[in-house]
Image (cartoon, helix red, strand yellow):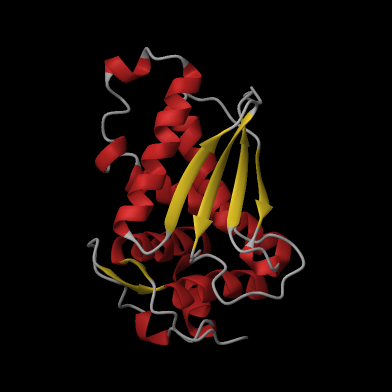
Amino acid sequence: MKIIPESGYYNSNKFARILIESIMEITGKNGINAVLNYSNLSSLVDNFPPDNLDRAFDFAHFSMIFQALEEIYGKRGGRGLALRVGRTTFDDVLKDYGALAGVSDLAFRVLPIQMKISIGLQAMAKIFSEKSDQISTVEELDDSYVYTIEQCPICWGREEEDHPICFYMVGLLQEGLNWISGGKDFRINETKCIAIGDDICEFTIYKQPIK
């Protein structure tokens, strides 16, 4: 496995802990131990990051965990796991946090769906930008929203891939929009990825719900 040098950019301990706990929930204790050992992160076996929002978990370590999922479970299996972990991260961390905490309020629920989606995406971007070294922005187009990440922890140090690999973020956005919209699903494509040579990671979120 490729060892990615530390970046000097950090995600929160809480996000990292949820990532590791989510993988353990899906793969079992032996599974997460295998992933951590394979990722050269054996110091985290039975010693998960603390449950706080301190920026202390290097992007390189975050990226190597996803690299390990792909190499242990194969491209398809790793992708499925990353999507599920992204959904769990939103469920366990973001939906009750900060700018998203009021989304379940009655005043928000009666807003038009596109207004709810726009507010929700902006809130998610704000959380990541304020609580990690991941810089996120949202742009609204006629038929879609474009969610952009600079300094992406998911694919950090993996510049030689032949396809976009930030499935974790796709899963997180899918779950977030499903919750914000009251159960609707939206098509989300990663249209740019630093891992294939782009300067940013970019996700196109189509406004028309799938169902």
Who is closer to the viewer here, 3 or 152?
152
Q: Please identify the quadrant where the C terminus is shown.
A: top right
Who is closer to the viewer here, 78 or 126?
126
Residue 87 drawn at (x, y percent): 49, 46
Outermost residue on the right side: it is 162
The relative height of residue 126 versus residue 145 in the rendered view (above or below) is below
Would you say 186 lies left or right of 172 here? Answer: right
Locate residue 157: give its quadrant.
Answer: bottom right
Who is closer to the viewer here, 165 or 126?
126
Residue 153 drawn at (x, y percent): 48, 66
Q: Is residue 84 visible?
A: no
Q: Please identify the quadrant where the N terminus is shown.
A: bottom right
Residue 195 drawn at (x, y percent): 65, 68
Q: Going 36% across and 39% down the picture, which residue do you hit?
A: 123
The relative height of residue 70 versus residue 182 in the rendered view (above or below) is below
Q: Going 58% across and 30% down the picture, which residue do you hit?
A: 185
The relative height of residue 72 versus residue 122 in the rendered view (above or below) is below
Q: Is residue 76 visible?
A: yes
The relative height of residue 77 versus residue 104 in the rendered view (above or below) is below
Q: Going 62% across and 75% down the picture, which residue do you hit?
A: 158
Number of marks in the image? 0
Would you say 46 lies left or right of 179 here? Answer: left
Q: Going 64% across and 60% down the picture, which residue do you hit?
A: 193
